[in-house]
Image (cartoon, grey):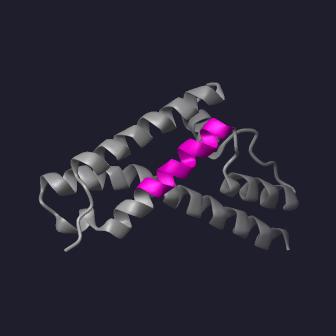
Amino acid sequence: MTEIITLLADMVLLAHFGLVVFVVGGLAVILVGNLLAWQWVNNPWFRLAHIATIAVVVTASWLGITCPLTTLESWLRAQAGASGYDASFIEHWVQRILFHEAPPWVFASAYTAFGLLVAAAWWYFPPRHR
């Protein structure tokens, strides 16, 4: 049973990582795609999903709300007998990869700055219907 719970926690981790890639990579694709005249990057559904995702991240960070995916993964890991995160998903992995600690306001500020870049891309390269 522990292996199944650990597998579920790993699946949540991968889903969470996928959302991070979607937000960060999505902005890169929007910018590059518009410079290369790729029409699909301005699909309203793609753009709405992208800006909504970063809006949720920014709002949660300013309200001090831990991401539900982080909470779920930590809970699953605890159920499997492992330790969960002591911080947010991004904070945990940044600290683990870069060996750097920063207070939560640093991450909230970074999310906000990135959210503003996404909003600027929305304004400069608006979504378009075909």
The location of residue 101, given as percent across then percent down, is 63, 26
Q: Is residue 100 something that shows in the picture? A: no
The location of residue 44, given as percent across then percent down, is 32, 66
Total numbered labels placed on residues in the image: 0
Instruction: Look at the image and give the residue range highlighted in magenta.
Output: 51-63
The location of residue 89, given as percent across then percent down, is 63, 46
Please say if 115 is above or below 6: above
Picture quarter containing residue 15? Answer: bottom right
Left or right of 78: which side holds 105? left
Quadrant that contains the C terminus: bottom left
Residue depicted at x 56% and y 47%:
57
Helix, strand or loop: magenta stretch: helix
Magenta-drawn stretch contains 61: yes
Magenta-drawn stretch contains 55: yes
Please say if 35 is above or below 11: above
Residue depicted at x 43% and y 63%:
49
Left or right of 46: which side holds 128? left
Residue depicted at x 22% and y 52%:
125
The location of residue 8, given as percent across then percent down, is 71, 69
Please say if 94 is above or below 36: above
Q: Is residue 51 something that shows in the picture? A: yes
Q: Nearer the viewer, residue 115 or 13?
A: 115
Residue depicted at x 79% and y 68%:
5
